[in-house]
Amino acid sequence: MNALAATKRNFRLASHILGLDSKLEKSLLIPFREIKVECTIPKDDGTLVSYVGFRIQHDNARGPMKGGIRYHPEVDPDEVNALAQLMTWKTAVADIPYGGAKGGIGCNPMDLTKSELERLTRVFTQKIHDLIGIHTDVPAPDMGTNAQTMAWILDEYSKFHGHSPAVVTGKPIDLGGSLGREAATGLGVVFATEALLADYGVSISKMKFAIQGFGNVGSWAAKFIHDRGGKIVAVSDITGAVENPNGIDIPALLKHKDSTNSLKGFNGGDAMDPNNLLIHECDVLIPCALGGVLNKDNAADVKAKFVIEAANHPTDPEADEILSKKGVVVLPDIYANAGGVTVSYFEWVQNIQGFMWDEEKVNHELEKYMRRAFHEIKAMCSTHGCNLRMGAFTLGVSRVARATLLRGWEA
Ligand SMILES: NC(=O)c1ccc[n+]([C@@H]2O[C@H](COP(=O)([O-])OP(=O)(O)OC[C@H]3O[C@@H](n4cnc5c(N)ncnc54)[C@H](O)[C@@H]3O)[C@@H](O)[C@H]2O)c1
């Protein structure tokens, strides 16, 4: 099942549990606006290339739309649509005053030089600058983009609208970025994991972890788990995978990755087949890379007791059912990876206030938001007798539905 069909299915299940009116249900599903642009740039060798860029703005009932921009060869409008919708439910679960959006460019950033990436980002910004804005739609980094990408968007947008640091989040600190933002999604994943494990009477220091993806989210999550005494027994990324049943020295792996850009050749563990990462022996599995990686072909072989969805929609509905039958507890993406958008919200607030918080305050507030959301999800689970995914969906959808009804939606 593709990402959009899976997201719609989860939304409809939540809508059914909540007993939403069918017209309201339909209106909540339809995106506010879908933008598709051609971005043509000269390559460094002078030849012209064109890439398709998307921005899907799903819903703004609770505030400006918010969501990442990814650069990846497999970006397609259906997936961006699903991710935009997930952002609407995610910002509502975190209870931050935003709606949902997502964007992307179908390109392989590894094949582009820095100056080509800058030109591509600037052309994309020129094409969408009228449709984003501080109180309209606030982009952030996602797969294949980073603080530098946000700096280029900020600079290009400001040429049209004047200096506007709050138009993007995940910026470099020197341009108004928030302390703690780079690590926020990974740290949020760890706060979420702590809350879940505490509910089962266990703690990170007693658990073995396997982590797929060692980029922004995966590497920070690994670091914070390692700091808390958790044993990370396997890590993979696009370059390969490494295992060590006694626990990988994560600071050493980070150093190795920094200097070689690869997990290959790390001498603190054995190389393993990256395809086996998801079915590796562990207590907690954390997918931190692509969507749809847990599916009907591998779900039955998952050994973990807990799956923490740090990536967006890593588990498709068939896998969800198989995992549930096996008694595996899945902590859903719209909660587990909400730390990034929560600190993005703190960054936006700081930019609007013109006042910078220290890192301790950022992390403390993040912990409060993550813990509060976990308890609110659990409350929905007990009210409706549902699992954590439906607990999170009913929480998010009910908040957006209430805002929509209060604003009055029958034009
Ligand atoms: N960065 C954020 O703040 C944020 C917030 C919420 C959700 N997410 C989600 O988390 C996931 C990761 O995002 P990120 O920002 O860390 O991206 P990133 O580009 O920094 O890292 C992605 C990682 O996945 C790895 N990867 C790619 N294909 C793989 C494969 N086939 N097998 C194994 N590993 C593979 C890459 O090598 C890299 O280590 C995405 O699903 C993203 O949507 C990110």
Image (cartoon, helix red, strand yellow):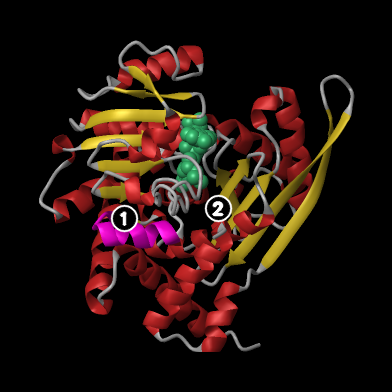
Residue situated furthest left in the rendering: 201
In the rendered structure, the answer to whether residue 104 lies left or right of residue 210 reads right
- The residue closer to the viewer here, 161 or 192, is 192
In the rendered structure, the answer to whether residue 162 lies left or right of residue 89 reads right
SS class of the residue under badge 1?
strand
SS class of the residue under badge 2?
strand
Residue 56, relative to residue 379: is it above or below?
Answer: above
Q: Is residue 407 visible?
A: no
Mark 1, Cα crowd under 10 Å, few <14 / some 14-19 / many 20+, is many
Q: Is mark 1 within 8 Å of ligand 1?
A: no
- The residue closer to the viewer here, 185 or 262, is 262
Residue visible at 51% across and 43% down?
290
Q: Which residue is mark 1?
A: 330
Residue visible at 57% across and 68% down?
60
* Residue 308 at x, y percent in the picture: 33, 48
Q: Which residues are magenta?
A: 318-330
* Residue 386 in magenta stretch: no
Query: For the residues carrying marks 1 and 2, which lies nearer the camera in this image?
Result: 1
* Residue 321 at x, y percent in the picture: 36, 63
Residue 230, relative to residue 335: is it above or below?
Answer: above
* Residue 358 at x, y percent in the picture: 35, 37
Quadrant of the rendered image containing residue 269: top left
* Residue 317 at x, y percent in the picture: 44, 62
- The residue closer to the viewer here, 43 or 232, is 232
Which amino acid is tagged 1? Val
Q: Which residue is mark 2?
A: 67
In the rendered image, which quarter contains the C terminus? bottom right
The mark tally for this picture is 2
